[in-house]
Image (cartoon, rainbow, N blue to C red):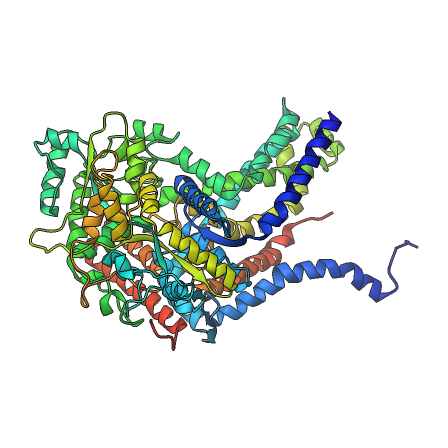
Amino acid sequence: MEKRATFSSTTIGLVFVAPMLLLIFVFFYWPSGQALYWAFTLEQPWGGGNQWVGLQNFQQLLSDPVYWNSITRSLVFGVASTAIAMGVALVLALFTDRELRFHRAYRSIFVWPYAIAAPALGLAFRFILAPEAGLLSVLNSIWPNIWNPALDGKDAMIAIVIAFSWKYIGYNFIFFLSALASIPRSLIEAAAMDGAGPARRVVDIQLPLLTPTLFFLLVINITESFQDSFGIVDIMTQGGPARATELMVYKIYFDGFKGLDYSGAAAQSIILMGLVVLLTIVQFRFIERRVHYK
Amino acid sequence: MHAKFLGAAGMFAIAAMLAGPAMADKTKIDFWFGNTGDIAKRVQEQCDRFNQSQSDYEVVCTSQGSYDASLQNTIAAFRAGKQPTIAQVSDAGTLDIMLSGAFYPANKLMKDMGYDVDWNDYFSGIKSYYATSKGDMYSFPFNSSTPLLYWNKDAFAKIGKDQAPATWEEAAEDFKALKAAGYTCPLGFNISRDEIWQYGEQFMAVHGEPIATKRNGYDGLDAELIFNKGKWVQYIKDLKGWYDNGEAVLKSKETGQTFVEAFAAGDCQVILTSVGDHGNVGRTAKPGLNWGVAMLPVYAGTERKHSFVGGASLWVLAGKSDAEYKGAAAFFNFIAKPEEALTWSTVTGYIPVRNSGYDYLVKQGFYDKAPYAGRELAIKSLTASPATADSLPGIRLGGLLQIRQEMANGLQAIFINNADVQTSLDEAAARGNQILRRFEQTYKGKQLP
């Protein structure tokens, strides 16, 4: 019979989880509860009082076509940046795993971008991608007006997708690399002896064995792209030009922290939370089926 | 080595013990502000001068990174009961704090603490912007500015002109001539939220046009935006025309060079920006750049009205001790001195806010010589017309920052997506009105003071 260490007493168990529960309560349930409450009220920013308005905040938002556009844009941003961040990270990890030259150095270097704060990152990319003075201005001198995130909404969206993906490539890379390292060498070697080339081995062996990691990163990337993008947007585009990069989370940040519309921002947060929960459920329901954990 | 270190530590300990009681006698007050960079340094210097000028109070001045962040932090601190004694609130945040009751009115503070302040010494345009509809001052105007037109004299000389355009019709001719003379950026501008101030609000101010009903919101929270119905529409159409002809060029952080940088580098020949940038342009101008400033142009046939003051004012927050309020009053008394006005206007581009300060600067010959000559035009612009009962004192609208954003979004649709001017401005006004109605509902039952 298998031996397991179990706690007989519920009290001891509860004592052990209490610190964690307390943390979760303070940093998640409490603010979420507060946001939920504010979403149904109109809150005076200086704390002079508030009044119950029921669903009014939600009605105003959901009847606003501009708000629906920002939801669409957030989805486009989420899908595009997740695809790029995961795709590039996977390729980099596969190459590093093949122990090409300097792979040890890459292993530590590629994670650095994740450690850079979003505003600093935004600042750097604003310079790199500036159409007149930046590093990409070369493009414009060859083909005039081909690249201008300041005036072209599509270019601006591409710019923030690049900046955001760049940050998450490092994060994804580490996960992919460790997952690849845990794939038994014998499998790869056996396939090689059977005559499978590197590409074949990736498709038939490594990718199927990576699916748990792929799924985990998919959920994390989609979620983060909805939540962690406002710093980059604020520095790089401020939601412009002409709302082209006004993501849901940026609008929350702007309305709440700059416009002092606490209740409007709270209602938007609740909608965003609902959307992220929904997306996560969809992913677990439909994509997890294809994941092989063992 | 070790002994040395211990010795030094011991010295510090003794020094701290000696200094301890002396410092405890001082009442410390916190002052949070939003300016950054060079201006933050200047504010800090002013605080240091105050601290050295007397021994009863010590003001601790902390920059919070930006106007928005400063306001946000102050509100969070206030809600947690840890507010600073003095907080800087920008023009856009004025109405919220005015309705909050979270402050100690400036006029009451000074009276209670035994200072006799001549409130009429403030320039009427500055006073009326921050005063209640009854003329009471709840806060102290601090860093104050107004926009000016900056022009490149050498470039204008090339098209045979020795003065800046006084009307927009004249400006249009000048832009065309500058373009023909080979200049690639006659007018450098931008249309983000930050430039609504000089291209929207101040344009309407000098033309005497309301941005909203109810005297721009001073007479009630039920004001409605009407900027889409006046001269501003024609102005945006003209601006768009210049933009399409390549006579006006968008210059921003996103394109790689702001319009102020472009002007200082000699790349753009005309810009509209705050007098607060006067010092900045002077310091960063490329060698030999021959430039000047002028008041904002108006359309021909318009009687010029005074422009609005921009910047921020200082509020004293509720819930502090008497000693702290005494310190705050002493600080305000100190920065009101004409000598302080001179130092402040010398090291920043900001203008003096009182007649006495201005007169002192004039007497000292401040405005006679470069690099400060020209800044007196800001005062001229702010006092171009008297503040009367039916004139527009400023803008008092809830959610002003969000309204500016809506206006900027409207302009961006016009300039970048070639949307119809009237339709876009109508939409911006409609969306802005929703913000106003939300604000009105949030403060239901509150009376605008």
The residue most toward the top is A101
Residue B413 makes an appearance in the image: no
Residue A292: x %, y % from top left: 69, 48
What is the count of numbered marks? 0
Near-viewer residue (A134 or A222): A134
**Residue at x 55%, y 67% (from the top left corner):** A34
Residue A114: x %, y % from top left: 57, 40
Residue B316: x %, y % from top left: 43, 60
Instruction: Specify the quadrant of the image occupied by residue A150.
Output: top left
From this view, report whether residue B303 is shown above or below residue B388. above
**Residue at x 33%, y 67% (from the top left corner):** B436
Near-viewer residue (A288 or B154): B154
**Residue at x 72%, y 37% (from the top left corner):** A183
B302 to the left or right of B396:
left
Instruction: Specify the quadrant of the image occupied by residue B421.
Output: bottom left
Residue A204: x %, y % from top left: 65, 38
From this view, report whether residue B53 is shown above or below residue B134. above
From this view, report whether residue A19 is shown above or below residue A109. below
**Which quadrant does the C terminus of chain B fall into?**
bottom left
B186 to the left or right of A12:
left
